[in-house]
Amino acid sequence: MKILVLAAALLTMSSAFATELKFKCEMKDVHYMNEFSLEAKVVSLDADKFENVEFDFTLKKAGFNTELERLVVNRTGDIKHFEAGTFGQKRSVGLISAVKGAEVEMVSLFIDFAGPFHSQIRLLNGMTYYGSCYSL
């Protein structure tokens, strides 16, 4: 019984220190760039890592009247924290995941960075898509 109480206490403490990020990435409808959009929530017990997070991207290739594509990937990667004033007035967070040879080789999402198109995903075929991400 003492073990159950201890386990419950540890779970409660670890969830109190969980990192939760809710964010949205948007396209700016620029016809000369490949773009993506995304709305996601990342919950991590480790402030510096995320594991098994599903990202449901909407992709748009450069050009006029191009069709939207959907791409769902499950990723594990690093969380980088940047204090206010480093890349803008707000505190910023970066989610970075690279897997050589995967369909999506790199996911680099920077949340609340100043300026547009600071986030990107790169596919195995070399295509890179850009987006602007901010916290919700």
Image (cartoon, rainbow, N blue to C red):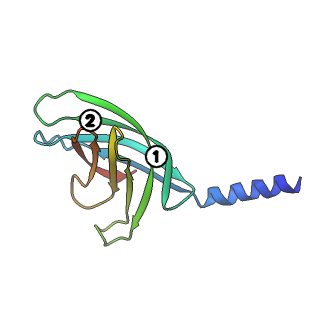
**Amino acid type indicated by mark 1:** Lys
Could you say which quadrant of the image residue 123 lies in?
top left
Q: What secondary structure is found at the residue carrying circle 1?
A: strand
Q: What secondary structure is found at the residue carrying circle 2?
A: strand
The residue shown at (51%, 49%) is 51
Asked if labels 1 and 2 touch by Cβ distance under 8 angstroms, the answer is: no
Residue at image mark 2: 59
Mark earlier in primary sequence (2, 1): 1
Q: Residues within 10 Å of mark 2 (few under 14, many from 20)?
A: many
Q: Residue 34, position in %: x, y?
A: 18, 40
The residue shown at (82%, 52%) is 4
Q: Residue furthest front?
A: 101
Residue at image mark 1: 41
**Which disc is residue 69 wearing?**
none
| Figure check: 31 above or below 115 | above
Does residue 64 appear to the left or right of 41 in the view shown? left
Q: Residue 92, position in %: x, y?
A: 36, 63
Could you say which quadrant of the image residue 122 lies in?
top left
**Amino acid type indicated by mark 2:** Leu
Alpha carbon separation for disc pair 2 and 1: 19 Å
The residue shown at (34%, 33%) is 71
Does residue 45 appear to the left or right of 136 in the view shown? right
Does residue 56 appear to the left or right of 48 in the view shown? left
Q: Residues within 10 Å of mark 1 (few under 14, many from 20)?
A: some
* Nearest to viewer (mark 2 / mark 1): 2
Q: Residue 33, position in %: x, y?
A: 15, 43
Q: Residue 106, position in %: x, y?
A: 32, 48
The residue shown at (39%, 55%) is 95
